[in-house]
Each structure stands twice: as C-alpha cells, then as structure tokens.
Image (cartoon, rainbow, N blue to C red):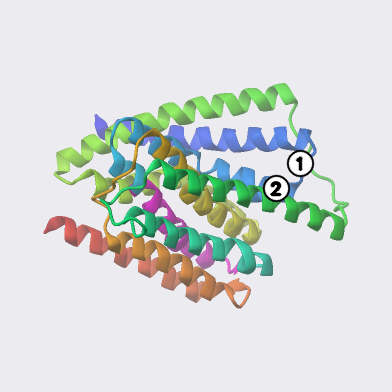
Amino acid sequence: MDYIILVIALVAVVFGADNLVSGSADIARRFKISDFVIGAIIVGVGTSFPELIVSSMGAFEGKVDVAIGNVVGSNIFNILGILGITALLHPVAVNRENNRFELPLCIGLSILTTLLAFNFFTGDDIVIGRGDGLLLLAIFALYIYLSFLRDRRKSKITPTPTEPQAAPQSLLKATLRTIIGLGVLIVGCDLFVDSAVNIATEWGVNEAFISITLIACGTSLPEMAASVAAAAKRNTELALGNVVGSNIFNLAFILGVSSQITPLSGSGITIVDYTVMIAAAVMLLIFSLNNKISRTEGAIMLTCFVAYNIYLIYTQSL
C-alpha cells in the first residue's frame, strides 16, 4: 500500500508545484513584476516548494536526517542529474552573470552549510542551530535584494521585448490556482514523506539514506520537469537558472527555516555527501566557464551522479 501512496503522492507533488508556480507567476505579471525576476526567483523558488514542505515537516516531526538529507540530496540531483540530462538533450547556455553571481554564491553556500553542519566555528556536536539558520536566512534575503537590483539595472539597459506574450490569467483565477497548488503540494509531500519512511523501514535502511536518495529525487521532480521542458524549447538558460536558483533556495531558505523549527543534527548525512554537493557546484562552475555546458560534460555529470548513488547503495549494504 505504501508503494501506491508513494506514486500518488509524487503525482500530487508535481501537480501542486506546477499550479503553484504558474499561478504565482501570473499574479506576479499582474503586478508588473518582470519576467527576469519571475524566472530567477518565482520559478526557481516555486519548484523548490516540495523540498521546503518536506524538510519543514521533517523538522516538525523530529526527523532531522530527512530535513537535511532532502536538501543535500536535492542539490546533488539538481546539478549532476537534472542538468546532466538537460545538457544531453541540448547544450546548456550559460551567461556571464551566472558565472559571476549565482554559481559562486551556490558554491559559497554549499561550503558554509558544510562548515555549519560540522560546527567548524564552535567545535560542538554536528548541528545547524537557530543562530546558524538566521545567518542563512539573512544571506537569502540579500540574494533576493541583489536580484531585484540586477533586474532593475538590466531593465534600464535592455529594451522591453516587442514580441507578444500570453496574457496572464485573471487575478482571482491565478490566486485560486496558487492556493489549490499549495494545498495539494502540502498534502502530497506529507504522504510522500510518510510512505517513503515506511518503505525505508521495510527495506531496513535508515532515514538518512532514503532522504538523500528517494525523497531528494522525488521532491526535485518539478525542477526536472521545468528543466527538460526548457531544453525542449531550446531555452536552456532558464533550465540553468531554475536549478541554481533552487539550490540557493534549498541551502539558504529551507535549512534556515527548518533550523528555526528545531536545531538540525543530521548525523546520518556524512562528510562524503557534503563533499559531493560542493564538488558538483564547483564542477558546474568549471564547465560553465566556456559559457556552455556541452553534451559530453552533461554525460560526465550524469555519470558522477550514478557513481555517487552506487556508492550510497554499497555503503548502505555494509
């Protein structure tokens, strides 16, 4: 029965995230918020709502391995898995601003989170406390502020496109769609976590393993759908922005919020997992220096993701 509930929950997560993102984007257009901000923040953040709900629920229920493992696993899957597949479908374009701002920030946050998780600055037990969470939330607020500043500067330099765009839905319809999407997403994530943990128990594996693999990949399905759709439309910059924006949101906002609910001590998440998360972000920056991620580089990223999961399965069987 848990397997059936897991599949239904995954469908609900994708449906809820899609409606939440579409509805909130239409509301944003009604209030004259630019497409740049919608793409960089609303879509990137919106597709990460499953991770937010799952990690928050994990924190509420005292399943801190789920709260942290979901974020670490999602960030690894987003870069190595989703961008790897996207680049195989079509080379991913990278602009200079990505190399200068988002990618270095993603690497810096990955390193900072690792240092906080192992209490590098205090030497105590492995825990991300409320003070650490406030620091992460402050960084996220600064990221949002700088994104709006960059958008304002870009709108002054770049003329408004003349191509006709699809008219947004009515404000009432967009609001209802957003609320329904959020509601379905919350219920779907709750069912997804419960059924995944039950399956993990049945298989005899720990919550850390299931959170960094099954739960992380499941909650990243909206990013996968958005990135593959963008690649199909040859709009690969959106795919990259969606993934990097989601990773920044996962590290700065989700861990920041979860740690305010309860201090996070993800003892089941090892230094190897954190190292792979950092290495994936560094690899992405290196591959992006040519302003493009090629199919070969996408294949390398995907191979690294498969190798990492083989390692997880091997260590779990020991």
Q: In this view, does 23 lie to the left or right of 220?
A: right
Q: Residue furthest left?
A: 318
Mark 2 element type: helix
Visible residue check, residue 191: yes
The crowd level at tag 1 (other Cα within 10 Å; few <14, some 14-19, many 20+) is some
Residue at left offset 76%, top offset 37%: 29
Kindly indicate the quadrant of the structure image that contains residue 176: top right
Q: In this view, does 36 lie to the left or right of 111?
A: right
Position in image of residue 132 (x %, y %): 43, 47
Residue closer to the observer: 24 or 227: 24
The crowd level at tag 2 (other Cα within 10 Å; few <14, some 14-19, many 20+) is some
Kindly indicate the quadrant of the structure image that contains residue 215: top left
Q: Residue furthest bottom?
A: 290
Q: Per the image, is 72 magenta?
A: yes
Residue at left offset 62%, top offset 50%: 142
Position in image of residue 288 (x %, y %): 57, 72
Position in image of residue 64 (x %, y %): 30, 41
Q: On screen, 244 above or below 184? A: below
Could you tell me the amino acid type at mark 1?
Ile
Residue at the disc numbered 2: 37
Q: In which quarter of the image is the N terminus?
A: top left
Region in magenta: 69-92
Residue at the disc numbered 1: 33
Q: On screen, 279 above or below 148? A: below
Q: In which quarter of the image is the C terminus?
A: bottom left
Q: Is residue 211 left or right of residue 224?
A: left
Residue at left offset 47%, top offset 62%: 85
Could you tell me the amino acid type at mark 2?
Val
Residue at left offset 37%, top offset 53%: 73
Mark 1 element type: loop
Query: Answer yes or no: do the residues labelled 1 and 2 have beta carbons within 8 Å?
Result: yes
